[in-house]
Image: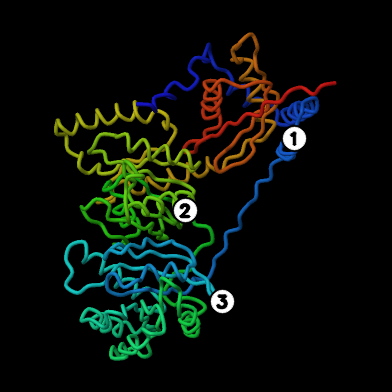
Amino acid sequence: MSDQRSQHDGDEYEAGPDRLEEKLANLDEELADQRAAALRASLADYDLDDEDAELLGGFTAGGEVVQVLPALPVVAIVGRPNVGKSALVNRILGRREAVVEDTPGVTRDRVTYKAEWMDRKFTIVDTGGWEPDARGIDRSVAAQAEIAIDLCDVVLFVVDAMVGATSTDEQVVRLLRKSGKPVFLVANKIDDQRHEPEAAALWNLGLGEPHPVSAIHGRGVADLLDEMMKVLPSVSAVAKNELGGPRRVAILGRPNVGKSSLLNKAAGEERVVVNDLAGTTRDPVDEIVELGGKLWRLVDTAGIRRRVHLQQGADFYASLRTSAALEKAEVAVVVLDITEQVSEQDVRIIDLVLESGRALVLAFNKWDRLNDDDMENIDRRRYLEREIEQDLAHVAWAPRVNLSARTGRHLDKLVPALETALESWDQRIPTGKFNAFLAELIAEHPHPLRGGKQPRILFGTQASTRPPTFVLFTTGFLDPGYRRFIQRRLREIFGFQGSPIVVNMRVREKRQR
């Protein structure tokens, strides 16, 4: 497999006993800073641009103050399938966020988004279509809609005005009356004034005045929101106060490896729909859960299939939203099914995390199936270790957690792994110490000659964190193997467990006199 390319990161530069760590431990910090200042001053003899000057100006690590914020009011959008709930969500948000397709049952979980209207912020919850006497996965979808009604401050009940009130709509009305929540009846698909009489027929539902809107075209949505703001509380009466800054954790993996089960077990409730049907989750689902005495924002994502460009409809957009959720996250938990061989698709998902620069934790799920000492299970555990050693060698630095999302076994071990990965993701090496590290490294293992020339490292600095990014000012290009060797030694000396490391070069020539 191609990912074995970095299995021997810089091994060709290893030689003799390594005393680098001991030397750095004994190095005086003040002396290291003086040496770094001298190296930085020597760069004046080289051609530098404005970006170089800005980079060399120093690094300021900004600290975030954790604040307790009042819980935003919650608005739930409910209705039977294919009446335009997700289209209304997109219209309120002002962007195409929720998956919309002209097929009933695209939305399955209750999905939360942050929205704003007239300088007032609130949380909007998109739900799957509610149907009576639903079975299987449809029963789970309906249950999520009922939970959304219980956990909201205001309900937007969406009805297809062109079809009229159905028996299912009437049963939803009975459900809403039991909840006691303020309800706005939304008569959707009124695209022009000629169709407004169709909305008037919905008075018969007994929920008061219907609000004619066209979610697709935006007609009437502003008037609806103005009326909703009159009853929407400033602080939610049902939602928990959010701690400012819970770390965002994206749960990724192939379809049907147990991502949603992991979120449900962590949340302690059936937060998302779980079914043996692969690809059940389509929208990223956020949930703030408490693990290890801390709050975390876990994001369940759609399973990433083998070839995204060949997907169609809802699955295609679900893949795009999974990538967007990863970009918003700080750390990714990649779930792997240990009952199946580590596949090329698993490796591709891990590489996607590396390309995004997010911290990484590997969760090997379904260990409850390998509990006994049956010979077949013993063989599978042995083969699994071999697969990890061969196919996942390039992420050997990522924390591993063996767990069972179904039973909750070893779920408590996920928190230390997340904390370790995030601490490494935020780690900063002082410039003086980093240049001392480079000096000792080069003294022990200089870059080999290439074409009769030997590139030199003039100065190095950590340009940023999240992920840790280092910039080396050099007199020539460094071999990829030598750069991987530097990354490997950085991990050996400074840790960085669970975080990718980026090493960039800036080749600079000496200024002509």
Secondary element under disc 2, as helix, strand or loop, is strand
Question: In this view of the protein, which residue sits in the foreground, 22 or 254?
Answer: 254
Residue sitting at the far top: 452
Mark closer to the observer (1, 2): 1
Name the amino acid type tagged 3.
Met
Q: Residues within 10 Å of mark 2 (few under 14, many from 20)?
A: many
Q: Residues within 10 Å of mark 1 (few under 14, many from 20)?
A: few
Q: CA distance from mark 2 to mark 3?
A: 28 Å
- Does residue 27 appear left or right of residue 445 in this picture? right
N-terminal-most mark, 1 or 2: 1
Q: Quadrant of residue 376?
A: top left
Name the amino acid type tagged 2.
Arg
Q: Quadrant of residue 508?
A: top right
- Please state the horizontal and vertical placement of residue 106, each as a whole percent of the image: 30, 62
Question: In this view of the protein, which residue sits in the foreground, 216 or 397?
Answer: 216
Name the amino acid type tagged 1.
Asp
Which residue carries the number 2 mark? 248
- Please state the horizontal and vertical placement of residue 152, each as a whole percent of the image: 39, 75
Instruction: Write the residue at 47% across / 22% down.
Output: 9
Q: Determine which of the numbered discs, if any, sits on residue 118 in the image.
A: 3
